[in-house]
Image (cartoon, helix red, strand yellow):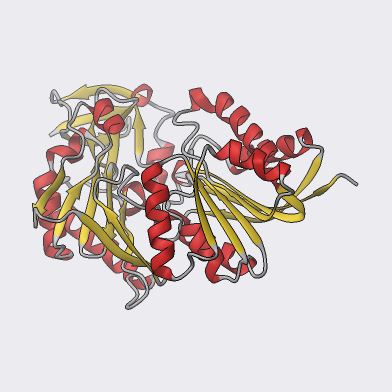
């Protein structure tokens, strides 16, 4: 067994349950570990703090899988996946006739760093985001087959994660029915039928489930602009909530086409208009036309690392300015950030500055984070990656 000895002063986070050991925290390595190896992590006195998988190419040298002297083996993966399934069941997922699309495994939140598993009906979509996890894919697929019994397992590991860890990106169906070419599932009573080639994450954004419910609750009688709409999940929520007009905007022609088809099947084609357009330009056009009662802005990740934070905050400020201008006085702006490096305070400050640039006031009414099937260890604040605010926008008084 290879051993990772921590420096004095770097033990407390790991002892408290933080799942990452950074390179600068390591005093020495013994046993000659190579990339992907199971290593034992010990404090300066030799006390075992747990086991993890070694990533010498990453700033995060070890991702912890256990806090005892337990190896990272097939039994651990099976038990953790079964534990994750039982946790989702306690959250009411899946819910018969309403929701069979949800996140089953959320990396560190389910004590399986580097592994993401989303359930989309009878298909499981996985992301193997570290070399150590990739090396154990056979064990993982077997555990998923035993615990979940999906018709097919898709590998949706992104090119960026694969490049960073020196592994292969996702390659489509890796287990089960090779003829599967669609992701057919339900979420909150809405039916989705998406091609497996859809280029976003595992295929859908389940992390915004609870915010979509809040938008639905606010939508009655309102006009709604859904910028960065992807396949229109927020638009559907607004329409079912009683919105009288919804405009769904996305730059992807494929996403817009899918959103139009999904809204038609749901019976909302007379309420939801789908538009292929740059989101900020759509916000500017909306401002010029008098604005909307509710404006939704959920841009892609703008700060993939701390080094990109300043540029990202400037971008959020510009988006907030355009979104505030697109919101009618007294209306609601729903603004999100999926960048882990952006704290909720950062997002609110960007909103405040953007509103001021627009000569408007924004008052935060609600704060939201990712849905409950995306759990976060209490010792791992970095895991709270999704932040959203619902703000009232009005003239300066």
Q: Is residue 7 visible?
A: yes
- The quarter holding residue 247 reads bottom right
- The residue at 61%/62% (across/down) is 245
* Residue 10 point in image, percent of width and height: 41, 30
Q: Foreground: 18 or 187?
A: 187
- The residue at 63%/42% (across/down) is 283
Query: How many marks do you count on the picture?
Result: 0
Which residue is outermost to the bottom? 96
Q: Dividing the image into 4 quarters, which one contains the N terminus?
A: top left
* Residue 52 point in image, percent of width and height: 24, 39
Q: Foreground: 235 or 377?
A: 235
Which residue is outermost to the front? 270
Q: Foreground: 138 or 41?
A: 138
Rendered position, 150 above or below 377: below
Q: Foreground: 282 or 17?
A: 282
Q: Is residue 76 visible?
A: no
Rendered position, 251 above or below 213: above
- The quarter holding residue 246 reads bottom right
* Residue 222 point in image, percent of width and height: 67, 64
Rendered position, 256 above or below 33: below
* Residue 303 point in image, percent of width and height: 49, 31
Which residue is outermost to the right? 397
26 displayed left or right of 315: left
348 displayed left or right of 262: right
- The residue at 84%/47% (across/down) is 395
375 displayed left or right of 1: right
């Amino acid at each position: 067994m290879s051993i990772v000895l921590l420096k004095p002063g770097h033990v407390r986070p790991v002892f408290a349950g933080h799942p990452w050991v950074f390179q600068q925290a390591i005093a020495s390595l013994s046993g000659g570990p190579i990339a992907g190896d199971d290593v034992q992590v010990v404090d300066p006195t030799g006390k075992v703090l747990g086991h993890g998988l070694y990533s010498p190419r990453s700033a995060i040298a070890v991702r912890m899988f256990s806090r005892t002297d337990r190896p990272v083996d097939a039994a651990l993966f099976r038990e953790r996946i079964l534990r994750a399934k039982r946790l989702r069941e306690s959250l009411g997922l899946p819910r018969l006739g309403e929701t069979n699309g949800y996140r089953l495994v959320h990396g560190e939140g389910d004590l399986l760093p580097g592994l993401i598993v989303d359930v989309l009906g009878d298909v499981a979509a996985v992301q193997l985001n570290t070399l150590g996890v990739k090396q154990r894919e056979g064990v993982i697929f077997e555990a998923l087959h035993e615990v979940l019994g999906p018709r097919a397992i898709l590998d949706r590991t992104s090119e960026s994660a694969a490049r960073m860890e020196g592994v292969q990106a996702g390659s489509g169906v890796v287990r089960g029915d090779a003829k599967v070419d669609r992701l057919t599932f339900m979420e909150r009573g809405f039916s989705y039928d998406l091609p497996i080639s859809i280029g976003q994450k595992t295929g859908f954004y389940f992390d915004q489930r609870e915010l979509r419910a809040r938008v639905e609750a606010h939508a009655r009688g309102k006009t709604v602009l859904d910028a960065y709409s992807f396949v229109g999940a927020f638009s559907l929520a607004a329409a079912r909530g009683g919105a009288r007009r919804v405009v769904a905007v996305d730059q992807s022609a494929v996403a817009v086409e899918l959103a139009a088809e999904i809204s038609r099947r749901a019976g909302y084609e007379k309420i939801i208009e789908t538009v292929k357009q740059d989101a900020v330009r759509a916000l500017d056009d909306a401002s010029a036309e008098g604005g909307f009662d509710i404006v939704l802005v959920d841009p892609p990740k703008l700060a993939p690392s701390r080094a990109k934070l300043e540029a990202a905050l400037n971008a959020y400020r510009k988006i907030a300015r355009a979104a505030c201008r697109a919101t009618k006085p007294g209306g609601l702006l729903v603004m999100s950030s999926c960048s882990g490096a952006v704290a909720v305070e950062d997002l609110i400050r960007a909103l405040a500055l953007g509103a001021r640039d627009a000569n408007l006031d924004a008052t935060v009414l609600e704060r939201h984070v990712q849905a409950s099937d995306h759990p976060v260890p209490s010792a791992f604040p970095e895991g709270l990656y999704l932040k959203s605010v619902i703000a009232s926008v009005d003239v300066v008084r």
